[in-house]
Amino acid sequence: MKIGVIGTGHMGGTLGKKWAAEGHEVMFGTRDPHHERIQALLQEAGPQAQAGTVQEAASFGEVILLAVMADQVERVLAEAGALTGKILINCTIRFDGQSADKEVRRLAQEARVVRAYHTLTWEVLAQPRYEEGNATVYISGEDAEAKDTVARLSRDIGLDPVDVGDSENMERIEAGIGMLWQALSPVFGRDFGFRLLRRESMDA
């Protein structure tokens, strides 16, 4: 699959490298594709990865990962151009009490927006396997087919995907994980994850 990654920080860089390692074609979208930091990222990502402008990455990808700081969202989506029919994975986070999900949906109404990866740190994304099992990634959105695609991409890189339904459900999960994070991060640091345990459905 062709994946455009908009954002080359810890989140975008980590996910892009892992998808490239699994054989997906990845283009990192950035202001300066020739910057030495981007070239170093490409060396780590391997032959399946390349770099371009934000617009080039958005045009390249069947799936687009939005992995930028909250104050850059409006600018980079304007640079990306038309995203009609494309799957846009929103993993941005806001710290001002506003909804990063609603903002992205407003700015990218033509895209098939899926919310994912924002409940995990990049350290967990880099190594999602624990002795007890793989870390769970929660996925939300209104487009079932788009969510299925993101679930497959998540399994490809060792995550346990769980579809939580719509945006309102995700907001509740975000609030719960936020409280758990405040309580547990002073003890465990950043490299800890959660796994949802569920039983196989059984016929009556």
Image (cartoon, helix red, strand yellow):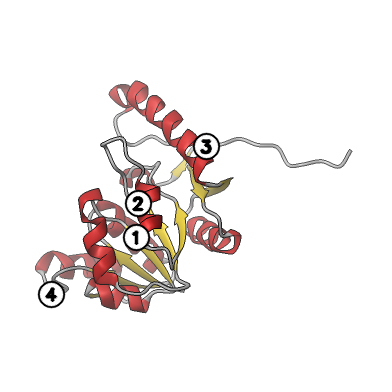
Measure the C-alpha gap from mark 1 to mark 2.
6 Å
As drawn, is 94 to the left or to the right of 124? left
Measure the C-alpha gap from mark 4 to mark 3.
39 Å
Of badges 3 and 1, the one in the foreground is: 1
- Using a 10 Å C-alpha cutoff, classify the residue at mark 4 as few (fewer than 14 neighbours), some (14 to 19) or many (20 or more): few
Amino acid type, callout 3:
Arg
Label 3 with label 2: CB-CB less than 8 Å: no
Q: Is residue 96 or residue 191 the one in the foreground?
A: 96
The residue labelled by disc 4 is 34
The residue labelled by disc 3 is 195
Amino acid type, callout 1:
Leu
Query: 57 above or below 10?
Result: below
The residue labelled by disc 2 is 103
Q: Position of residue 108 (x, y in %)?
A: 38, 63
Question: Residue 107's mark?
Answer: 1
Amino acid type, callout 2:
Glu
Label 1 with label 2: CB-CB less than 8 Å: yes
